[in-house]
Amino acid sequence: MAGVSSAQELNCEVIVNAEQTGNTNITIFRTLQNSLSEFVNQNKWTNRDFLPQERINCSMFINVRDYDPNTNSFNATIQVQSSRPVYGSTMVSPVFNYNDEQFSFRYTEYEPLDYNPNQFDSNLTSVVSFYVFTILGLDADTFEEDGGTSYYEQANQIVGTAQQGNYRGWKAGDGNSSRFRFNSDLLSNAFSDYRQVLYNYHRKGLDLMHMSPENGKKGITASLLNLRSLNRNRPNSLLVRTFFDAKADEIQQVYSGGPQLSTREVVDALNNMAPTFSDRWSNIR
């Protein structure tokens, strides 16, 4: 079980929205929001000590589509986002932006929320804990090469135990956007280049821009072209899609100011990898 400590890793805003249920005044939704906020922010998830300024800023937006008070059953989606600071600046870089539509669970008002890595207790705590470790892993990968492996492995342990609950999102047959698929790809050697891109984009790109905008922009360009190589081998992969869900606006901004570099090749690559963001790429000059 995760323990309460003053050295929390996350600074996470948790929002439970119940507008679609038509019962927004029911106190269980506010209780759930408060309990989840304490669960995520007050538990100690790692053996590292995080200084207050090192805590990872993130959010979890839970949209409850349906609630049955007779069975305490919730049908919902969860949008998970996280960011990290950019060295030498006040800029914040989005790292993760993921919408999970396979999120159903049972919750009784005021029930304690606990994380146990060795057994399945509830789909609510399993899904939220899975995303805690995924956030930790992705953040670590942006600071250190393969820094997130241990966190992805802990998330993988949750995948294994949660399969006992027969909820969607945890098994290989649950689609190409499932939690199973996302975690499996992060741990797969076939996608090791993706994690290298995460590191290079941030440490050899964004984090250099305060010293040399030109070198920083060149580092970002090199990372995006490396991502193109991965995409050619694994077209339309979940990891590449989630990368651009988080980064599209930022990439446009990076190329919209500062030293001018040739952008034809990178724009072609962006249109090939993420055509749904072509309106962003058309603004790159």
Image (cartoon, grey):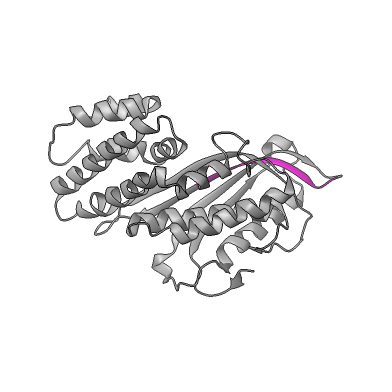
- Residue furthest to the front: 189
Magenta range is 71-80
278 shown above or below 205: above
Query: Which percent across, then down, holds residue 155?
Result: 55, 55
170 shown above or below 53: above
Residue sitting nearer the eye, 85 or 176: 176
- Residue furthest to the right: 70
The residue positioned 37% from the left and 47% from the top of the image is: 192
Quarter of the rendering occupied by the C terminus = top left
Quarter of the rendering occupied by the N terminus = bottom right
Query: Which percent across, then down, holds residue 20?
Result: 69, 35
| 23 relative to 129 in the view: left or right | right
Is residue 99 within the magenta segment? no
The residue positioned 61% from the left and 55% from the top of the image is: 158
Query: Which percent across, then down, holds residue 75?
Result: 71, 40
Residue sitting nearer the eye, 33 or 229: 229
Query: Which percent across, then down, holds residue 115?
Result: 65, 63
Residue sitting nearer the eye, 172 or 280: 172
| Magenta span: chief secondary structure | strand
The residue positioned 76% from the left and 52% from the top of the image is: 107
Can residue 157 be seen by looking at this rendering?
yes
* Quarter residue 147 falls in: bottom left
